[in-house]
Amino acid sequence: MTMDAARKGGWDRQLAMATLIAAAVLISRGILIAHDHGPTVDENYHLYRGLLFLRQDWPHIYDARWNDPPLGEALLAIPAWLNGVRMSNPIYASAWSRDVPPLAKYCYVMPDSVRIETAIWKSILFLPEIAVIFEWVRRVYSAGSAWLAVAMLLIEPTMAAHLPLPTLDSLGTEGIVIAAWAAWRFVCQPTTARQWTAAAAMAIALLLKHVALLLPIAALLMGAVAWLGPRQAPGERWAGAKKLLVAAGLAPMFIWILLLGEFSVPRDFSDRPFFGKAGLGSHGIPAGLYVESVWEATVHARTGQENYLLGQYSRMGWWYYFPVVASYKIPIGIGAVMALGLASLIWIKPRYEEAPLAICAALWTGGALLQHVDVGFRHFLPALVFWLMLASRVGSSRGWIWPALAWLAMGWAALDTARWSPDFLSYVNFPRTSAYLDISDSNVDWGQATKELRQWIDRRPNDGRPVYLGYFGRADQNLFEEIGPRLTQYLMNGGSWISRTTCPQAGNMSVPRHGILVVSPVSITAQFDRSDRFAKFRNIPPEQVVGHCLLVYDLDKLNGSCRPSGR
C-alpha cells in the first residue's frame, strides 16, 4: 500500500509498526526503571497537586503553590488516583528540621505496583508523539528518515530516563511536538476542522508544562512562513490569517474548558502594579489557577535557582549551560547522526517543509539559553527533539552510504546507552574523570538510587562499621525504612544529620571519620549545601559507585585507621 493510500484512510503498516515497536521498548524499559529505582526528587511534588486536581479538592488546591499547569500533573497522577492514593503536602516534610526523620504522617513512598502502573501509563501517553514524529518526518523527508528519527528518540538516554517518571519533562515535550504539528497543518491548509484541532492541541500543551508558552510565537512564525510560501493565492492568505486569529482566540477558551470552568482569584496579584490597577487582584478570573501558575513560573524563571557547572556556582545560570551539558549527555552515536544531518545540507537542499522544524528547534533552543534555571539537561528536551527530527534528513539521502553510516552510528548509540540501564539519568557519553564535578543535579543524581543502595548494603558483609549517607532527594521519606537497618545516619539536601532516635550530637556533626560514607555527587558539588562540608571529597576518587551515581568512601582507609576515631 502506498503512503498516499495510507493517508486516505487505509492501513498504514509502517506507522503501525513504528508505534508497536515503540510501545514494546517504552513499556518494558519503563517497568524496569520503576522496579529498580526509587522515587526521584520531584515525583511527590507533582503527584500531590495532580491528585488534588483529580479529586477537585479546591481548598487544598488553592492552598498549594502552583508553578506548573494543573492538567499535566493531573494526567501524571491518574494511576495513583485510581488506586486511591492520598498523601500530605510534601512541603511539610521539607520543613522538618530535627535530628530525627519526619513524622510518619508527612512521609509517603508510593508502592512499587503503582509506580510501575505509572511508568506504563506514561509510556502509553508517549505513543502519540512517536506517531506524530514518524508521520511528520516521513512527509518532510522519507520513510527511512522517519524510522531514523524514531530510533533516535527511543535510544536518547535523557528521554529514556524521564519518560517513566511522574514528572512533566517528557509530557511537556510531547504536548509541544503535537501542538506544533497541528499548527503547521492548519496554517498550510486552514480548514475549520484543523483550526479547532490546532487550538485544542495548543491549549492542552500550554496546560501540560510552561515550557510550551513559546508555542504562540512558533505558531505566528509558521503562519508567516505559510503567508510568504509559494502555495497560496493572496485571497487564501488573508483568509488563513483571519482563521489564525480566530484559533488564537479559541485556545484560551479550551484552556478554561479543560480546567472545568475554574474561576478564582490568582494569589499575590493584589500587590502587583498591573493587576492591582486593573482591579484583578481582588476579583476572580477564568482559569485563575492557570494564570497564577504562569506567574509563579515567570517569577521562578526570572529569579533563577542554585545552579552548578564546571566548578562554578550561579543563581542566574549561564547561557552556555545546555551546549556544555549536551557534550556530556548526548550519545556520540546520536551526535554523529546530527553531524551527518548537518552535512547533508550539501547534497539535500533545504526544503520549505522543514521550516516549522527549524523554527521550533531555534525557538526552544533560544529559550533554553536565556532562562536561568540550569539544573538539568531534561529542560532541553523540547529543543532536542526538533533537532533530532532535522538530523534525520540524512536518512533520505540517495544511495546507501550516508543512511548506512547513520544507522551504524545508531547501533553504536544503542549499545552505549544500554550499558547504563536502568541508570539512564546518570548517563555520560564517554568516560571522564569525575564528570559529576562538571555537571550536577538531575544530570547525575535525582535521588533515584535508594533501592540500589539498599541492595549494595545488603550484599556487603556486615563488619559492624557504621554506614552514613549524604542524600540528595525527597525529604518526605524515612531513609532508615527505605535503606534498611544497617544505615546509621543520613542527611538530606545539605541539612543536619538525622538519627534513628534523638541524638544531640548528630545534627552538629560535620563529616564522620569512621565507617562507610555514601554521598550524592550533588552533595559533593554543594550547590544546595552552604556549609560545603564534603568539599575535600572533590579531590578524592570514590572506591565504588552505586547505581552510576552514589559515591562510596571507606573513611577508615582515608583516615589511616581501622577503629573509630571520633566524629
Image: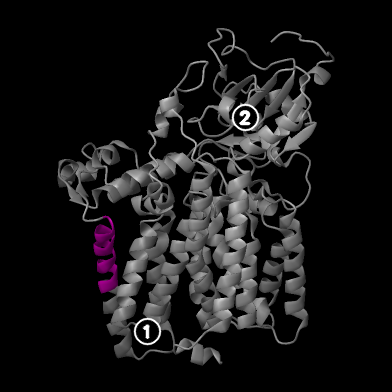
Asked if the stretch drawn in magenta spans residue 307, the answer is: no
User: Depth-wise, is mark 2 or mark 1 nearer the camera?
Assistant: 2
Residue 441 sits in quarter: top right
Vertical placement of residue 549 versus 186, above or below: above
Q: Residue 82, which numbered label?
A: none
Asked if the stretch drawn in magenta spans residue 250, the answer is: yes
Horizontal side of 225 relative to 487 (left or right) equals left
Residue 297 sits in quarter: top left
Front-most of residues 363 and 53: 53
Alpha-carbon span between mark 2 and mark 1: 58 Å
Q: What residue type is labelled 1?
A: Gln
For the residue labelled by badge 1, is the local secondary structure a helix, a strand or a loop?
loop
Total number of numbered discs in the rendering: 2
List the residue tagged with mark 2: 483
Residue at 67 percent across and 67 percent down: it is 338
Q: Is residue 141 at least partly visible in the picture?
A: yes
From the top left corner, tell me how far across and down residue 289 is, in percent: 27, 47
List the residue tagged with mark 1: 189
Look at the image and tell me in which quarter the N terminus lies: bottom right
Residue at 38 percent across and 76 percent down: it is 223
Vertical placement of residue 202 versus 208, above or below: below
Look at the image and tell me in which quarter the C terminus lies: top right
Vertical placement of residue 466 versus 202, above or below: above
For the residue labelled by badge 2, is the local secondary structure a helix, a strand or a loop?
helix
Residue at 15 percent across and 44 percent down: it is 283
From the top left corner, tell me how far across and down residue 80 is, in percent: 42, 47
Mark 2 crowd level (few <14, some 14–19, many ≥20, 10 Å Cα): some
